[in-house]
Image: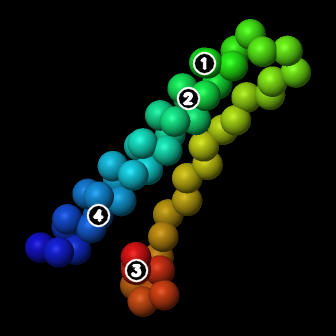
């Protein structure tokens, strides 16, 4: 059960980061010299204990 909750929490955090990047891109759309950011996601190998958060 704890693993499922941690997975859900991780997913929510990931979506929050993606939304933050999108919001920043929209907010600075008309700012001279602004270059948009991009959220890059990567799967974690959860079989490796070092990757468990």
> For the residues marked 3 and 2, what is the alpha-carbon distance in whole angstroms?
27 Å
Q: Are marks 4 and 3 in contact (CB under 8 Å)?
A: no
> Residue 52, labelled with which disc?
3
The picture places residue 53, in percent across and down from the top left corner, at 40, 76
Q: Secondary structure at mark 1?
A: helix
> For the residues marked 2 and 1, what is the alpha-carbon distance in whole angstroms?
6 Å
> For the residues marked 4 and 2, what is the alpha-carbon distance in whole angstroms?
23 Å
- Residue ID for mark 2: 22
- Residue ID for mark 4: 7
Does 32 sit left or right of 2 as displayed? Answer: right
Q: Secondary structure at mark 3?
A: loop
Does 43 sit left or right of 5 as displayed? Answer: right
In terms of image quadrants, where is residue 35? top right
- Residue ID for mark 1: 26
The picture places residue 9, in percent across and down from the top left corner, at 29, 58
Q: Secondary structure at mark 4?
A: helix
């Amino acid at each position: 059960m704890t693993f499922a909750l941690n997975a859900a929490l991780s997913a929510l955090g990931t979506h929050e980061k993606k939304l933050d990047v999108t919001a920043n891109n929209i907010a600075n759309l008309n700012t001279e010299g602004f270059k948009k950011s991009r959220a890059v996601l990567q799967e974690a190998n959860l079989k490796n204990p070092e990757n468990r958060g």
